[in-house]
Image (tube, rainbow, N blue to C red):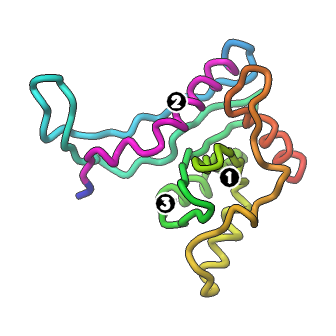
Amino acid sequence: MATWNSRGLRGSTLEELINHTNELYREKGLALVQKIPTPITPVKIDKENGNISLAYFEKDSTVDYIGVVQGVPVCFDAKECATDTFNMRNIHEHQIAFMRDFEKQQGISFLIIMFTARNDFYYMRFSELEEYIKRISQGHPKNFKYEELSDEYFIKQEQGALVHYLKGLQSDLKER
């Protein structure tokens, strides 16, 4: 069974930025998107400060966020990458399966990837993710490079939204 330790907080910076953006979207009546908590069972708790230092995952989580944007159901996962090469092993098969099933129900699935060294954010359409998965099945390395990504889907800070992903969603919807 998988266990959680200090590495379990990877991606928390990006999630804080997205949470702030989602709150702004809610306040403006643009979207209602919530963070889905990962269910864990604590094993070891530091009694002095109450922090969990060891826990196990109760079950595989789905994606980080789920909600609705102007009547459009959305789900997405937030990923951070410290280099210009994103390792596809960071996306788990159960997450891909959930996003695929979500798409079959007429929802929109995507990733938000933060390239931390560049402080750049990218909206990755599910169809783009599927292309990288297909490439791997054809023997390509299990990664993609920053340079391969479409300029149109890089996310900018706008109108107070720190990770203004609605522009990427709008472009994604136009392509469907």
Q: Nearer the viewer, mark 2 or mark 1?
A: 2
Circles 2 and 1, Cβ within 8 Å, touching? The answer is no
Mark number displayed over residue 16: 2
Circles 3 and 1, Cβ within 8 Å, touching? The answer is no
**Residue at (69, 45) in percent of width and height:** 107
The image quadrant of residue 167 is: top right
Going by the numbered disc 3, the residue's amino acid type is Asn
The image quadrant of residue 155 is: top right
Rendering coords of residue 19 (x, y %):
56, 27
Reading the chain from its start, which is encountered first: label 3 or label 2?
Answer: 2
Q: Nearer the viewer, mark 3 or mark 1?
A: 3
User: Which residue carries the number 1 mark?
Assistant: 103
The prevailing secondary structure element of the residues shown in magenta is: helix
Secondary structure under tag 3 reads: helix
Q: Residues within 10 Å of mark 3 (few under 14, many from 20)?
A: few
User: Which residue carries the number 3 mark?
Assistant: 90
Magenta range: 3-25
